[in-house]
Amino acid sequence: MSTLSQKIDFAIIIRVKNANPNGDPLNGNRPRTDLDGHGEMTDVCLKRKIRDRIMELKDDQGNYKYDIFVQSDDRKREGDVYNSLKARFEGVIGKNIKDIKSKDEASKKACKRWFDVRAFGQLFAFDGDEGSGLSIPIRGPVSIQSAFSIMPVNVTSTQITKSVSGNEGKNGKRSSDTMGMKHRVDYGIYVTYGSMNPQLSERTGFTDDDAEVIKSVLLKLFENDVSSARPDGSMEVLARFWWPHGCKAGKHSSAKVHRTLHVNDDGTYWLDKLENLDPKVDVGF
């Protein structure tokens, strides 16, 4: 199957209401914000959700359609026996990878096996025996930016009581309650942008069909992603914008394309026109 036939730019508008879209573990899991108070969802967070949605896709026989290399512990595929990325790589690709030829073969095999590797790329860097190691860098054709809110967000922090304890208190009695904090963004409209590069797809084998898979899951980014921090319905993709260029070189730079999208704080938007480039706009799921 041929690789990606044209450059593609894309964007999505996300609405957050009474949820923590991306907590910062170094700041008490408060929602991430920049120095100006704008909310942020990192590219790592967004890629994680794309991976999770792709992992859920099944064919007509009920079999999973795509393998994912970077799996989160709470969504690990049933039957996956690997407890680390190194173990998964060595179990599928092998251990005896030392010279340039074997590294090139390993890279091709990894891209063919794992959807996220041929889409986003991956750095396989693992320690070896007796001071040896492995390093195989793969640049992926799909890039996505961190999502930022249109306006500064208000973060509400609520003190909660943890009345269920895993430890026994004195004399066999339940230990005393402990206190904790829970944080949320009251309301925010976030926007993220991305692009797909045909030149890099030639190295990883990323295809037009793969691009359509990512396109389909962007609208369902927060489905099956419920947690205490993100109650069902609190996170929503309002719209997806898809700019197919019709050629590998691209008719305009990604920066120029992304600047055509203007988003208001209520989630409404308008688009500037670009010569010979028409976006495909779809509302959320």
Image: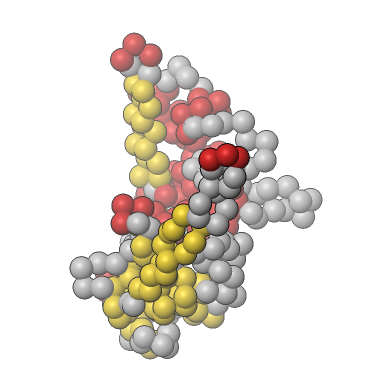
Residue 203: quadrant of the picture: top left
Tell me if residue 187 can be seen: yes
Along the line of sight, the residue nearer the viewer: 86 or 104: 86
- Residue 38 x %, y %: 28, 73
Along the line of sight, the residue nearer the viewer: 203 or 33: 33
Residue under the point 40% across and 45% down: 121
Q: In which quarter of the image is the C terminus?
A: bottom right
Residue under the point 65% across and 55% down: 57
Residue 129: quadrant of the picture: top left
Tell me if residue 93 can be seen: no
- Relative to 195, say whether 67 is above or below: above
- Relative to 195, say whether 148 is above or below: below
Along the line of sight, the residue nearer the viewer: 131 or 118: 131
Along the line of sight, the residue nearer the viewer: 45 or 232: 232
- Residue 89 x %, y %: 49, 30
- Residue 135 x %, y %: 34, 29
**Does 46 sit left or right of 59 as displayed?**
left
Residue under the point 36% across and 53% down: 25
- Relative to 227, say whether 234 is above or below: below
Residue under the point 63% across and 42% down: 77
- Residue 245 x %, y %: 40, 69
- Relative to 95, say whether 211 is above or below: below
**Does 128 sit left or right of 90 as displayed?**
left
Find the residue positioned furthest to the top. Answer: 130
